Image: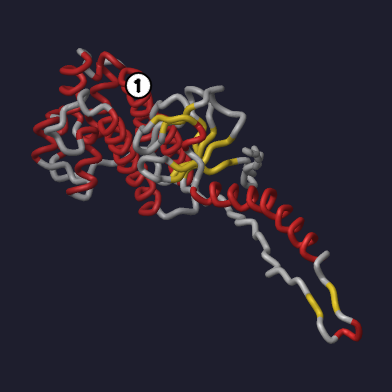
Amino acid sequence: MNQRISVSINSDENGFIGRECPKCKEYFKIKFGTGLPIHQYTCPYCNYTGDNDEFFTEAQIEYGKSVAIKKVVGPILDSFHRSFKKLETSTKGGFIQIKVRTSGNVFKIKYYQEKILETNVICDSCGLNFSIYGVFSNCPDCGRLNAKFIFEKSMEVLKNKLKLSEDSTLESSLKNDLLKDSLIGAISSFDSFGKSLRDKHNTKFLYDTKNLFQNFLKLNESLKIYFGKNIKDYLSQQDSDFLFKMFQVRHIYEHTAGVIDNDFIKKLPQFNLQKGRKYILDKKEILLFLEKLLSLAQKIYLEVE
């Protein structure tokens, strides 16, 4: 006779429930009640798609088994124990006694605790609230990449860093470091954003260029080849020229301590008279750069996803 046992899987203190991909065995968490009303998940790491009940974690399965055994086998053994107790007897005077003893099996519930993950995400496409290892991944519900969300958050952090540079008590060298870090960090985040897009859509970008999203001219060429658009088509000629300049400024701050060199002048001849001088970073200019770079990232994302 088959008996169906219902076992509840509890969420963690933040409402998340752990999931495990049956293919790559990687762990992630989702919040029930958010996202799409579907009965399938897509692994955020390897893109495997399967029914929801394929994604129980090993700990959840062991917990479920222990609960089921306790509910089904426990009462059966208790019944056996009571039946055998009826066999107990003894002779007059207690010289001969029959005692029935059971081993006292205890069925322990295998409790578990959901893991703490690195990144919490709310998908801007379907609204699923999920949590992952690492940073970039696909949404388990709609399958869209979370790269735009992560990049937007990184831009917010950099804007807050720029605000710190307004502190009048800071030394000028520290203020300049905050500006430099914001500039370099913006392009580093943009490159990470680009790598996540290239990993998912590996036929839509040039693959003979390392760090494509750090190379403004190569990125412009790639967009033209695969989407028929230049960066100026996504923004404007003025904004494209501005971004190109700031990419070169970032390059000299990474490699020549911000000093304008021949390579910089070759790409931006209008700075010819400033050769050997340090490019002076300006908070308003970097803030504008963050905004234009964010706009470009959002439009490339929409083009690809």
Furthest residue in direction front, as rendered: 92
Indicate how the structure is coloured in the image.
Answer: secondary structure
Displayed quadrant of residue 182:
top left
**Nearer to the camera, 42 or 235:** 42
186 or 258: nearer the viewer: 186
Q: Position of residue 230 (x, y in %)?
A: 21, 17
Residue sitting at 30 percent across and 16 percent down? Answer: 234
Pointer 1 local density, CA inside 10 Å: few below 14, some 14–19, many at least 20: few
Q: Residue type at mark 1?
A: Glu
Name the residue furthest right: 92
Q: Answer whether residue 272 is visible to the viewer in this image.
A: no
**Which residue is at the front of the view, 199 or 43?**
43
Q: Is residue 1 left or right of residue 211?
A: right
Quadrant holding the N terminus? top right
User: In the rendered image, which residue does mark 1 sit on?
Assistant: 305
Q: Quadrant of the C terminus?
A: top left
| Relative depth, front residue between 160 and 271 | 160
Is 63 located above or below residue 229 in the figure?
below
The x and y percentages for residue 302 are 36, 19
Q: Which residue is located at x 65 percent, y 50 percent?
A: 67
Where's residue 287, x and y in %? 40, 33
- Residue 167, percent from left and from top: 49, 48
Q: Which residue appears at 36% of the width and 35% of the height?
A: 286
Residue 204 appearing in the image: yes
Label 1: element kind: loop
Residue 288 appears in which quarter of the rendering?
Answer: top left
Give the vertical position of 207 relative to 175 (above or below). above
